[in-house]
Image (tube, helix red, strand yellow):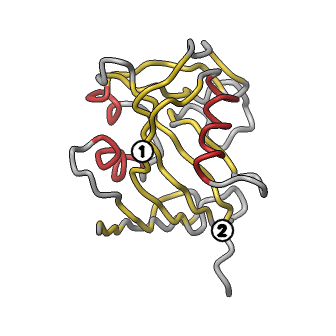
């Protein structure tokens, strides 16, 4: 069966002091498969945009801010992650500088500044605990991972760096 993933972006906005990250606490929609979890910002790529333009648009839509500096930290293939088992391919960015004041909330939930050192203490997707340290580490190389899901749970995690 051919691999035809949904292509998406996922971004982690750093505070100006680089000690906190802007996350959405998915607490607004009872039917949300992410309900109760904390996530970065992002979403599906549109047909007429590249991944950088898609990331900028998602940050603008979800947080009301403009990305001034961002870096691609990695890519993740999530076979089976979707609600109905769809495959996803995510481009993971760290946003190092932005302009504007972030919204307090959006239709998915409350936006919160969280200390980077506290992220792993939050309710997250199990798989996030594996790749989030790579988003914030000092290694300048991007990571490229595969994280299969089955029945809503992570099966395994492998990654490479060039």
Q: Estimate the x, y position of residue 85 in percent, counting from the top left.
A: 67, 65
Report the residue at 65% width, 60% height from top: 7
User: Which of the 4 quarters of the picture holds residue 102?
Assistant: top right
User: Which of the 4 quarters of the picture holds residue 141?
Assistant: bottom left
User: Which of the 4 quarters of the picture holds residue 19?
Assistant: top left
Of the 4 image quadrants, the one containing the C terminus is bottom left
Element class at badge 2: loop
Q: Earlier in the sequence, mark 1 or mark 2?
A: 2
| Front position in the image: 14 or 159 | 14
Q: Estimate the x, y position of residue 23 in percent, counting from the top left.
A: 49, 28
Report the residue at 31% width, 24% height from top: 18
Judging by the rendered image, the residue that carries numbered circle 2 is 5
Which residue lies most toward the left here? 138
Disc nearest the viewer among 1 and 2 = 1
Q: Estimate the x, y position of residue 118 in percent, counting from the top left.
A: 30, 27
| Front position in the image: 160 or 88 | 160
Element class at badge 1: strand
- Badge 2 density bin: few <14, some 14–19, many ≥20, Cα 10 Å: some
Residue 90, relative to residue 36: is it above or below?
below
Q: Give the side of residue 45 with respect to residue 76, left or right.
A: right
Q: Estimate the x, y position of residue 14 in percent, counting from the top left.
A: 40, 27
- Badge 1 density bin: few <14, some 14–19, many ≥20, Cα 10 Å: some
Of the 4 image quadrants, the one containing the N terminus is bottom right
Total marks placed: 2
Residue 108, relative to residue 45: is it above or below?
above
Report the residue at 65% width, 28% height from top: 60
Judging by the rendered image, the residue that carries numbered circle 1 is 71
Is label 1 in contact with label 2 (beta carbons under 8 Å)?
no
Residue 45, relative to residue 12: is it above or below?
below
Which residue lies most toward the right here? 47
The residues bearing labels 1 and 2 have C-alpha atoms spaced at a distance of 23 Å
Q: Give the side of residue 12 with respect to residue 54, left or right.
A: left
């Amino acid at each position: 069966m051919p691999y035809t993933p949904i292509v998406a972006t996922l971004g982690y906005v750093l505070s100006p002091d680089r000690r906190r990250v802007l996350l959405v606490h998915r607490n607004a929609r009872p039917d949300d498969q992410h309900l109760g979890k904390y996530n970065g910002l992002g979403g599906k790529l549109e047909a007429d945009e590249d991944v950088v333009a898609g990331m900028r648009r998602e940050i603008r839509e979800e947080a009301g801010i403009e990305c001034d500096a961002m870096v691609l930290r990695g890519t993740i293939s999530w076979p089976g992650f979707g609600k109905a088992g769809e495959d996803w391919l995510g481009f993971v960015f760290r946003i190092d500088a932005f302009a504007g004041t972030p919204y307090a909330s959006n239709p998915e939930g409350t936006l919160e500044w969280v200390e980077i050192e506290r992220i792993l203490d939050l309710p997250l997707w199990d798989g996030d605990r594996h790749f989030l340290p790579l988003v914030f580490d000092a290694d300048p190389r991007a990571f490229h991972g595969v994280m299969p899901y089955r029945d809503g749970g992570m099966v395994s995690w492998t990654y490479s760096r060039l």
